[in-house]
Image: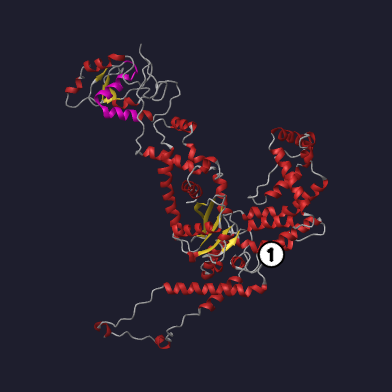
Amino acid sequence: MEAEGDGEGEGEGSCGSSALAQVKSEPKSEEEDEDEPEELVPKRGNRSSAVWLWFGFRTSDVEQKTVICKTCRRQIATSDSNTSNLFYHLKTRHEALYLESLRIRDHLPLRSNGGHGAHGAHGAHGKGPKGRRKEPSPSYDEQSRRHRDITEAICRFLVSEERVCVASADTVRRRGFRELIRTLEPRYALPEAKHFTEVQLPRMYEECRAEVAEELRAADYYALTCGGAPPYVGLTVHFVDRHWILRSRRLQTGYLPEERPADGVASLLREVLDSWDLRRDMLVCVTADHVAATAAPEEGREWNGLQCFGLHLQTAVEMSLKTSSLSQAAVSDAVGMCKQVTAAISNSLKRRCDLAKAQVDLHVPIQHLKTENPSRWGSRQQMISRFLQQEKAVKQVLLEDRRVRHLTPTRQDMQILESINLALTPLKEFTDAFSGGEYISVSYVKPVLHLFKNQILKPRRDDPPLTGSIKEGILGHLCHTYADGPGQRLLDAATLLDPRFKSAYVDPERLDGIRSRAVAEMELLMAGVRAEVPAPPADEPDPPATAAKKAKRSLSSYFKKAASPGAASQPDRASAELELDTYLRTADLDPEKDPLEWWRRHELNFPWVARLAKKYLCVPATSFPSERIFGAGGDARAPTASCAKPQRVDQLLFLSANRRKT
């Protein structure tokens, strides 16, 4: 029985097993004996099969009953629209055309009429009309462009996952992922995970590293941030490029088996500087959450250091709670009770359901309780604030469950938590603002400290005693931390070079010293640039023929004064002071505007002050840029990540952080 439609079988169809005999016995057409064969016309109507590209009909064959091969002009026995014998003819007599027909057929779109066409019911991996399995389509060669593109796309997907450390090493081994790739592209053979980890990832890493290195070579100055999640420590570089755009690039993720010993962090910094060929004299500062990375040069290190502002603020909060007006035990008990209640409800499905029901009954916002994370800034305030919002619902859940009824907070506990929340709530916005890495933050430290002292942390008459005590403790710790020292001088310079602030938040008694240091740095820059300019060639005597011809002197040449050998147009120090004073007299920039955009427009007006601004404004105030990648990359201590080699973790986090930026 003959099959209907354009079946794609190869050697099957209406002729079945007699196809070979039919082709061998088929007579040659009359046009083969003519010098100029008759032109063939294509098949009318439905031509969904690719095989019709090589077959046609005579012009005189109005009803198109006799199929003729365009290559050898042989007549092919077939019936209706069955193409089995056509494919068989190409396979036995024109092998190259047969392979080409398979390639074209595999890329034809899927037809909607269930069963006809290149990918219908009789697709490449299906069965023909008589149940015989067809030949599978050949897989892509590993060196083909299509295979390489798919492999690279998968690799980009692996390094762009939100939990790259946890997922990347195991994704390609998962059955569901492999079935997805097989369904999307049956001809693509997915390589093993070893191919991605040992071939593709290192190749992408080297390409991305070369791009980052090229950017760093063009940077005048740079700063580093150091931080992470033990046992891994990340290093990120920050610089202002020639377009006055603040750039951040991940450099390396180091593995320190112990809890980040002092010599380990310092050794990692030296290793990174050497491996990236970064000049130490161009390193402005290292911002970190560890003392070893922020030691000053006079303390035995090769770089200036600035401790993380967020870490200082968190430490100030901890110290203020311990030295508050109330007994340390009362404050500790209230905070400990809040942690226990939060854990008791969050870790029980039944209590979470009871909390949701109580929230509906009491018309309280439906929200989960928050737990404190010691490594996350402001998490204690967020836990206490959420606990106070859900006080009624929490008490109802505790009173209904006799196993946790003893955790019901007392009135004194709630008063202590309210006082703590009242003192810490204004600080939440500042911790969030300093966490950003895409804008200038170091010049904000001095203005924020001024704001803390005069508004945010200034005790009020209506403040509870505990709230006032906490504010005083936080402010005292911050003022002591940012006393005179290398870090203080760096903050003064950054604030002075920010056109939004300038000298507004600088102690007037310190202003002259800050200006003197800025002028001295500008003098060094001028001297360095002058030393790099090659000396003009010595005057050579004119040739005899030219010396005979003397040019006539103009009248103005008699009044021209010879310059003294060592005299400059203006002394460097006077020029630097004039430029700095002119900059300080310009109108202050709106605090909502971008200072780097201002410097881009005024660089020609203040060239030497602009170079200092590019130097100091690239320093981050916190180490968050180096810690953020661990939140995006997943927990580095997870079981699947802990099995990965440190070199592999470094490559994954490097690509995850930098491929979106380069």
Q: Main secondary structure of the magenta part?
A: helix
In the rendered image, is residue 367 in sight? Answer: no
Rendered location of residue 6, percent (x, y): 37, 20
Residue 389 falls in which quadrant of the image?
top right
Is 67 in front, or is 290? 290
**Mark 1 sits on what residue?**
479
- Could you tell me which secondary element the residue under label 1 belongs to? helix
Looking at the image, residue 180 sits to the left or right of residue 403; the answer is left
In the rendered image, is residue 232 in sight? Answer: yes
Residue 92 falls in which quadrant of the image?
top left
Does the segment drawn in magenta span residue 90? Answer: yes
Residue 345 falls in which quadrant of the image?
top right
Q: How is the image coloured?
A: secondary structure
Residue located 42% across and 72% down the image? 532
Residue located 26% across and 27% down the image? 95
Is 91 in front, or is 380? 380
Check the image and report above or below for 255 versus 2.
below
Rendered location of residue 149, percent (x, y): 40, 40
Q: Quadrant of the N terminus?
A: top left
Is 26 in front, or is 471? 471
Rendered location of residue 61, percent (x, y): 28, 19
Residue located 49% across and 38% down the image? 170
Check the image and report above or below for 428 versus 355.
below
Is 197 in front, or is 125? 197
Looking at the image, residue 416 sits to the left or right of residue 567; the answer is right
Instruction: Farthest residue to the bottom: give it.
Output: 558
The magenta-colored residue range is 79-103
- Tell me if mark 1 has few (under 14), some (14-19) or many (20+) residues whose alpha carbon lies within 10 angstroms of its own: few
Instruction: Farthest residue to the top: give it.
Output: 1
Rendered location of residue 371, percent (x, y): 68, 44
Does the segment drawn in magenta span residue 555? Answer: no
Looking at the image, residue 437 sits to the left or right of residue 24; the answer is right
